[in-house]
Amino acid sequence: MGNFAANEGLSIFVILVWLGINAFLFVNFYIVFLDRRWFYTRVLLGQALSWARAPAAALNFNCMLILLPVCRNLLSFLRGTIQHCSRTAARQLDRNLTFHKLVAYMIAFHTAVHIIAHLFNFEYFMDAQLNRNSSLLTFVLSEIGNGDNASFLNPIRTNETNPTIVMFTTIAGLTGVAITLALILIITSSMEVIRRSYFEVFWYTHHLFIIFFIGLVFHGYGRIVRGQTPASLKANNPEVCADQFEDWGKNGSYCPVPEFAGNPPGTWKWVLAPMILYVCERLVRIYRSHQKVVITKVVMHPSKTLELQMKKKGFSMEVGQYVFIQCPSVSRLEWHPFTLTSAPEEDYFSAHIRIVGDWTQALYEACGGDKNETQEAWKLPKIAIDGPFGTASEDVFRYEVVMLVGAGIGVTPFASILKSVWYKHIQNNQEVFTKKVRQTKIKFPWKLLCVPVNVMTHAAGVFLRSTSTGCARRHRAWPDFLSYNIYLTRWKETEAAHFRVHHEAENDPITGLKQKTLYGKPNWDNEFTNIASKHPGTKVGVFLCGPPALGKSLAKQCLSHSEADVKFIFNKENF
């Protein structure tokens, strides 16, 4: 239970607070529109009035939040500040995209409720105009304001129209349609299958948020939903005068014709500050994108993976961080995230880019990956860099024992960590980790998924060879400072024969390491049990860069294997 609180407690608390605020706003505004000021409006619309206004309040709150999780520079600043006080609080910032998605789903839900309620409202407004019976209060209310149109209640002013025409001839209708279409396109293009296979579609449609927020700010300026004015309430008490509507305004009647007005638009008060923050965020990104980046080396790895080694004035990084890369010759609008594979101690920074889509293929060709001859430096494309940005892997040196799990190309952030560990040790740095009284071990179960010979096997194999050999040579008292397992879970039949033939070789046929590759999926229960038995009384940091399914499995293992004397703290890369 204690480990569950350490891993998920703060996240659950944040979600509960967020849900609580949503529930409070919904219920509160539902009750507000049951007030007698809205009595005559409810005569026309019934309960649909409250069902339309309550989700609108919750929408304002969630639209205030939706931009904050994607302000990367703000989050990096907060993470660097908070982690000195609370590691647990800093880890919550690594789940920014998860929260961003939850807020988006909540916006979609409240939008649906709001739209459905207003569809009923427009039908009720139309029915009140069509049923021209002066003995009905609904008709009398609809006729108010026909003279100078100063104080109407029913926005449909004539019976020679229909709700569709009203929808496309009013501010609320036009902006509502624009907001809804933008939201539908943004959410549908964010589905995993589209985002992975057609990233450009996801990228471009997501920028419809500009239309969404412009429409949102102006949506309430038409003041279609109206209530009785405070002055009119004093003169025309609806609880008394509603039954005497036929005598309103006549001589001898103490019930004048009621006057109505809409609430002033208030959405801008909710979203103005986040919009300003986001504009500042984009200005910082634009400034960074114009800083000169020099490509110092291009390496073509097997399985069509491109390694770019770059330099940029003033660039400073930590292990496990990532950057966004833009190549103007490929696209001036697209920015793609890539984990840094270099170490902070090196005089350059690098990224390994797997060629899996149109953008990466175009970059691959621009860097000469499709050519046999060496590409001249002046022919290399111009690159823009935004970042670096923090991730969970920054906390790797804050644990006594660390377990790194990389799946497929997900080993890239851990390449940076291994190189940094190696540099720290060759520089005779004994204060690498949190605890200085005991030597720290890194446990590295390296899992390769979905590719027969992972593209990073060669690169990370070099890091593992140099690190394990160097540490053993310099620190013979700790020969197991670094331990690692490499798993290959899928392979082709032709490669299986090659593996069998060379299985008895001194070095592994896949990685070239002394450590042999293991075939099949790892038994995570055994792995966690072994680590728990070897490291009692410690907090083990479990870091994953891999698919969500593997993340769920490891999160469950961290909870089930945490006991009084050993605790597993789960951290996952998200970008």
Image (tube, helix red, strand yellow):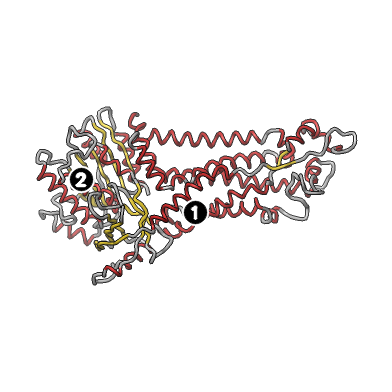
Please, is residue 337 above or below residue 232 in the view? below
Crowd class of label 2 (few under 14; some 14 to 19; many from 20; radius 10 Å): many
Residue 173 is tagged as none
Count of numbered circles in the view: 2
Q: Residues within 10 Å of mark 1 (few under 14, many from 20)?
A: few
Say what secondary structure mark 1 lies in. Answer: helix
Of the pair 361 and 503, the residue shown nearer to us:
361
448 lies left or right of 335? left
Toward which corner of the image does residue 532 lie, by quadrant? Answer: top left
Q: Nearer the viewer, residue 131 or 482?
A: 482
> Residue 59 in the image: x percent, y percent?
56, 43
Amino acid type at circle 2 is Val
Residue 421: give its label: 2
* Disc 1 to disc 2, C-alpha distance: 43 Å
Please identify, in this view, whether the residue under mark 1 or under mark 2 is nearer the observer: 2
The numbered mark, 1 or 2, whose residue comes first in the sequence reads 1
Helix, strand or loop under label 2: helix
Quarter of the picture holding the N terminus: top left
Q: Is residue 250 rendered to the left or right of residue 368?
A: right
To which residue does mark 1 refer?
A: 188
Q: Residue furthest top?
A: 564
What residue type is disc 1 on? Thr
Residue 133 percent coordinates (x, y): 83, 45
